[in-house]
Structures are given as C-alpha cells and as structure tokens.
Image (cartoon, helix red, strand yellow):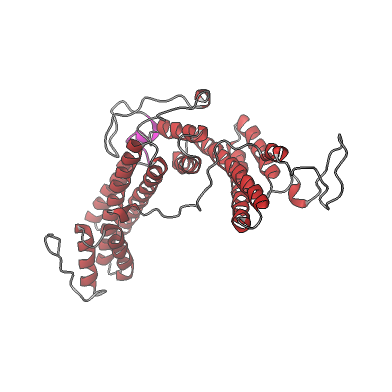
Amino acid sequence: MASLLAWAGQPAPLLAQTGVLPLSQTLAQSPDSSSTLPDGGNQTPEGDEITDFRPLSQDTSLLSLEGGQRLLESAALAMDRQDYTTAQKDLQNARLAFNQISNFHQQLFDLFLGIDPRVADRQRLSAVESAQLRDEAAYRLALAHLAQNQPDVTVPLLIQVIRSQNPTSSLGQQAHQNLFNLGFMDSPPPALAQGNAADLVTPSPGPTEGTAGETAAADDRPLARSDSALSVAAGRRMMQEAEMALADRNYSLTVEKFKDARQVFNQLSNFYEGLSAAFRGIYTDIAETERMRAVETAQLRDEVTYQLALVHRVQNQSELAVPLLIQVLQSQNPSSELGQQAYQQLLELGFVDTPYRWQGVTGVR
C-alpha cells in the first residue's frame, strides 16, 4: 500500500531555516567582512558609506533580497487597505524571487563545498536567509487567500511552509494553527514557542477524534463543514452525482463528475502525505493520523479512477481507459483486489495477453 502514498509534484528539497541571523548581521560578525570596493580597492575610511552599483545589488532588481523585500512591503500596504489582489500579486512575485535566489545560492554552495569553505559558507547563509524570506512570503500569501475565503489555495501554501520550516518553528506553528482553524487538521500545535501566541489566529473549537471525513456535529470550521469543496465529503458527493448521471446514460456528465472527484481525492491524499512527512519523527501521533488519511483518500482516488476507466470503455474509448487502468495498478499493487480488477480489464480490452493467476485471493474476474 506504500505506493498509494506517491507524492507528485513536490518542490526541490529545502534547507532548514530556523534561528538564522539576517545576512547583513552575519557578514558584520565575519572576520573577513571588511568593507572593500567591488574592484578590490582600499578600505573605505570610517564614517563613509559604500554604494554598491552592481545591477543585482539594487532594490529595483527582482533577483535580489532587497527587491523581494520591497515587494513584501508593498504587499503589506495593500493588505492594510484590503487590496488583496495587489497583495497576492506582490507576495507571489516575492515568493518566486526568494525561491530562485535560495536555489541559486544552494547550487553555488554545492559547487564550492570542499573547494573554498569561505565561499561555500557564504552561499549557504544566503540560501538559508532567502529560503526564510520565501517561507514568510508564502505564509503571508496564504493569509491573503484566506482573507478572500479561498481555503483550497490557502491549504497547500500552509503545508509547504510547515514542510520547509519544521513544525516546531514559530512560522511552522503558525501555519499549523491556521490549518487547524480551517478544519483541515484535528488538533492545534502541541507546543507553542514562548512569546508567539499573539501571532497566532485564535483557535476555533476542534472536532472530535475520527477518521478522515468525520467531524463533530458542532464543528463549523470552513473545511470541516459538509459543504466544503476540499473534503472527503465533497469527493463522495461528486461520486454520487456521477453515478446518478451514469444511470441516466449521461456519459459526458459522468466523466466530468468522476474527474472532479478524482482531483479532490488526489489533492487531499497529497496534502495529507505532505503533512505526515513533515511531522514524522517529531509528533508521531499527528504523523500517523495524516498517513492514514493519505491512504484512505488515495484508495478513494483509485476507486474513482477505475470507475472512470469503465465509463471510457463503455464509450468505446479504450485509448483513454488503458492509462487509467495502469495508474490503478501502479498505485494499488497487482495483488490488491482493485489491482486485479484493473488487470482483468486490460486483458478484456486486449492490451495484455497473459491472464493474471493469483492464489489465495478472490478477485472480480
């Protein structure tokens, strides 16, 4: 069942970003951080300021920390006047810029590691600082989407922050708290860093313990409600609508609803698996809860995928059914009941020639 938890479309591995001094302070404390002109001239007399005219050192450059911070300031002003569209645009651009900068410095660190420790360490510090700024931009972007009641966009951003930051960091705890307030997680952060409580959104009453899709009757958090578009209940509702359309032989609507349900379950499975990976080895109970949710929603996704393949077969669209059936086999494992059914369909379609003979398992033939 491990293949159920395949995580698609993950970003490149991220550096840990906790407890990092701003780069200017780091350089000021470095013994080799004497102020010199770019061309290697003499040290500037005390009291004089150096003006760095290099293109990427200007705050007008998007590929610089100064340029990204300028976008963060612009976004903060836009948020104050409730101009969320402008804020989202600035925060998205800042996030992309900081991510690029972090990746480039990380690549330079890898290149100089073992060759010039001084250069390598400087690149590592720059990568960490820009990654921290990227995560702060991502968190603010999530809050901007949340202010516009867009939880489907907010959730993946908050999960990315937790995965990058570590659930025990201040920013990671704030992201966790917001996921709890939205109803995507069952419990608030187990431990809050001292002095950070004021930065957190006030918690809403949480649901009782249960499996994915089960919520307490009094739970009115956005993603815990039955009408939420990003929930197991929403995916099941789409499956029922697809089955009703199939009964009416409305195949186009059936395909549409099955695809929608498949997308919801796939998103949920990926999100839950991401959270499980982030909390693994830190908070075991949370990691296991999210892992089980990932398995459950992946199972539902594969069931919908199989049903969608059958609809394509009824429509004599074998070229659409085959890749879906193979996806089911890859995710489920050929020895599972659903995997056996998928292989049998491939055999009946003529895509494979060898019957699958299994022992000790009763499958649908």
Q: Position of residue 278 (x, y in %)?
A: 42, 42
Highlighted range, magenta: 221-229
Residue 345 vs residue 331: left or right? left
Residue 244 vs residue 162: left or right? left
- For the question of whether residue 165 can be seen, the reply is yes
Residue sitting nearer the eye, 218 or 96: 96
Q: Is residue 340 above or below residue 23?
A: below
- For the question of whether residue 227 can be seen, the reply is no
Magenta stretch: helix, strand or loop mostly? loop
Residue 92 vs residue 229: left or right? right
Q: In which quadrant is the N terminus drawn?
A: bottom left
Q: Position of residue 36 (x, y in %)?
A: 82, 46
Q: Position of residue 305 (x, y in %)?
A: 30, 57
Q: In which quadrant is the C terminus drawn?
A: bottom left
Q: Position of residue 297 (x, y in %)?
A: 31, 47
| Residue that appears at 58% across and 37% down | 84
